Image (spheres, coloured by chain):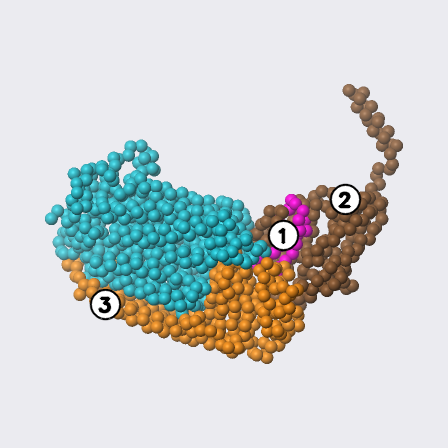
Amino acid sequence: MIARVVAGLVVVSVAGATAGPSHLPPPAGTISGKVTYTGTPPKMRPIDMAKEPACVTDHPTPVMTQDVVTGSANSVRYVVVYISGGDQGAPAATDTVRYDQKGCLYIPHVAVMQVHQPLEIFNDDPHSHNIHPLARVNPEWNKSQPKGAPPIRTAWDQPEFIPVKCNVHPWMHGYFAVLATSHFSMTDSTGEFSITGLPPGTYTVTAWHERFGTKSQEVTVAGSETKTANFVLTARPY
Amino acid sequence: MGRLFAVVVTLIALASATIFALHIWWLPPDISTHGARIDRQLNETMVVAGVLFVLGQLALAFFVWRFSTREGGPPRPSRAFPGGPTPLVVLATVLVGVEILVLTFVGSKVWADVYQTPPAPGALQIEVVGEQFAFYFRYAGADGKFGAMHPELMNDATQNFFGLDPANDTTARDDIVVGSLVIPVNQPVVLRLHAKDVNHSFYVPELRIQQDFVPGMVIPLHFTATKPGKYELVCTQLCGLGHYNMRAYVEVKTRPEFDQWLKERAAEL
Amino acid sequence: MAQGKGGRAVTHGAATGHAPAQSFLRRHVFSVDHKVIGRQYLDLALVAVVTGMVLSWIMRLHLGWPETPVPGLGKLAPTGAAGGVITPEFYLALMTMHGTIMVFFVLTTAPFAGFGNFFLPIHVGAEDMAFPRINMTSFWVTLAAFLVLVSAFFVGDGPPLSGWTAYAPLSAVGKDAGPGQGVGQTLWAVSIAMFCVAQLLGSLNFIATTLDLRTRGMSLARLPFATWAWFITSVIGLVAFAVLMPACILLILDRVAGTSFFIPAGLVISDRLQPHAGGSPLLWQHLFWFFGHPEVYIAILPGFGIVSQILPVFARKPLLGPRVFIVCLIAIAFLSYTVWGHHMFLSGMNPVSATLFSVPTLVITIPATIICLLWIGTLYGARLRFTTAALFALGFVSVFVSGGISGFFLAQPSTDIYLHGTYFVVAHFHFVMGVAAMFGIFAGTYFWFPKMFGRMMNETLGKWHFWLTFIGVYCVFMPMHYLGLAGNVRRYSAFTDDYLQPLIPLHRFITIAALFTGAVQLIFLFNLIRSRLRGPVAPANPWEATTLEWSTSSPPPHDNFGGHPPVVTHGPNEFGGVGPQDYVMQAEPR
């Protein structure tokens, strides 16, 4: 018995000694790019928050609608870009995603998270909000969060793009983008995204926007290179 | 004990009636063209009710005081009410009956004036949708026509509260949708109330007007506001958890201010 | 040998009679004895009223101080009141359960099923109800209905929040409509449908017993006033509950079977187009209020009867105008079916019908006014004795006058335009139901406790209970009229609107008065329990009253009259005269 263990140890250490240096990190590529639109997007209009004066005073200039947020050079914000085919990355991130209700807006407008990742929802306003994630795959729920109530802690089990609404303030809309993969990014005000830490392989990259729809493309990453993948979404005025 | 009862009842009756009479808590000033008659009906009813209330409580108190057994007093037979029940039946029937006739006769006209008469020609038409838990208002825009409402297109996320289809319906493209009811002063206004989901109700205390929204029905409501200012429209039909917070502001503006406001909204489209 | 109505000989133990039960369970739990059943109903109503009152305390605490956590509530209701701070949906669920429990399981149960079951057979001189086994069934179905209702507190989505009126489509579309509108609402509808069945059976029993089991000499004209009230209430209930039950069934079908009785097409709720078409929300309102208005008379008429029974005893003179009183009860019962639309003036129904409904609504004031005047007229020339029962009966007159008069404003469509849906309505119905009907129950309790339990209640505690409650209820509910006149909308879980801010101090005053008045009821509870255990033994007729229950022992024997069914020779109203006996009992030998 002891002889077999010793023999096993010898084999392993020899194998280790003859393999490459094992303390270096594996190669990690990046897919980055820009999301833009063609066509005419809907006009961004000021949100009428008149029924909640506390929120009107929170915004010196009125907030514009957030379902379509465009920038210079036809860039599109709040596009979730993620790996839908190929290596899905690490399971279940553990750091908490934070979702705030402040000034009668959801911050961020789209919160991206992985399945099972903890989500904490805070009410930072001096009045009640009511969070209603309109989930169709995951269990749907609907809870009020009065001023001073503790944050709501939850997590989602299935990938889904979940619209979130506040019943009490109908203009409040946001999304929980719940993804299976840990490889994701979201475009910022310049329309740019960047997905890092990708092992070599072929990936299907999908860009999702709440009004302009979804587009996918295949990208192959080898080693530590950065591949560019731009998306052009079709915009319509209505 | 009888005296205590009489005193307590008397105090309660007088204190309550005084608070009513002094209008310590009362209706806000009326800003509508039809409200004066409602206020008069209310005041007349208040006088009748007040008199009946005070008289009834005082009669109870007085009789209890007067006809208690006194300790150690001489035994005495009880005495029947003079005339038996007949005077009371007559009193109640005549007193209440006459009051009913008067109140109904006058009151039915007040009621019909608001709910059974058509709006004035040239009234400003505004569509209202009541949803869980806000009111939204729609003006026809430059073309003077309202686009059709399609429930399946209603989408709060894209601010399409009326379910309009501007892609295919050109009349819908200039419709102005806002979260406050903005109207010009001294202008007859006719609202059409649509319920998106459940029952709601339209209530502006200063306008002396109230009307339920009923799913499946479109209900017209008309009035004229007589005083510029900012007032609150609140929901009075239990519609779910956000019922307490379902309100909109009613802004009564002067004609030039209103025209200016409408122009600014149209420019945002 | 017992004798039934019209002199027919009825052998002891035939048809209605039954031998006394032997086992503990058969004697105290599954008993067919109307006296046990009556006590069971009263016990159920006691549990219900304590529950309903606690719910109202939590509601009022929230209304006065919405952001302050209620200690301990966070553990009891982690979703509805996380951290002890009550959510809007939880407030509305409390409100719905408060109204439902109080209207059905207190105000319809205690004065009618409770006291009626115990005393109606005795008042007519019978050994038991006409159908004792059906009577027992009625109670157990009522209890089951209560348990089904309370179970809504424990389902995932919580109790319904659509009010005791459960207007469709909010109550009909299912859980899309929001929290509380899932299983909880279905349980509510099932519970009420069961309650209707129990009440229909109970009404049949009351009617059959009153018409068929009167003892020799007990003509209808000689029936005690409370019995007349229970009899007429039963007739009202027969038609009213027969409408509510199918309405609840239709509601359940809309919720679970995909029908659309109450749901029109094109509704978008929770961003979903609802798969219904063709129904009418107004249909629910018509069905509900066709029941709902007679229901409030079901709640108050027994109180009228109890007060008319009690006042002569402590005034030591007959009720003024006994036949007029009965005619007025019948008029009210008849008219109660013609007025339901006054709950719906602004509902979207044809405005012409508003005027049509308001006429009988105002006309019903006439018999009600006559009755109040008859009570006050009874006091003229009286020799009042102030026991607690007498005080609650007198207090009933005061609070009923207060509550009835506010009805004047709501009966007219023109003034209802402003007052509908405000606290003025809340003040009105709480005065007539929450206060007057409760005073009827208290009066009945203090009056009949000695007969039911063979012991006297403590009069000192009783008087403290009366005075603090009488002043307390006026402090709670009179200010609500003022709130209504200021336009304060009802059924709001919080007062966030600008125009409501100046009214919040008045709300806090009401909350404190409500908590105080609620605490005072502990005196009553203490008195009940202490008197049951250690109260002085009660004689057969401690109040020197005339009706048949006072001819038998306290408490009555199993067959009510110890094998000697009474022969009635007088009406119930024989008071007056000087001398050691200033009254004549109904079964007094001629």
Amino acid type, mark 2: Gly
The residue indicated by pointer 2 is A86
Colour of chain A as rendered: brown
Residue C454 figure quarter: top left
Picture quadrant where residue A212 is located: bottom right
Q: Which chain does tag 3 point to?
A: B
Residue with the most extreme bottom position: B256
The span shown in magenta is: A153-178
Quick check: B57 left or right of B191? left
Q: Which residue is mark 1?
A: A121
Q: Secondary structure at mark 2?
A: loop
**Up-down relation of residue C405 to residue A179 (above or below):** below
Cα distance in 3D space between marks 2 and 1: 31 Å
Q: Nearer the viewer, mark 1 or mark 3?
A: 3
Residue with the mark numbered 3:
B90
Could you tell me how far apart the alpha carbons at marks 1 and 3 are, in whole angstroms?
69 Å
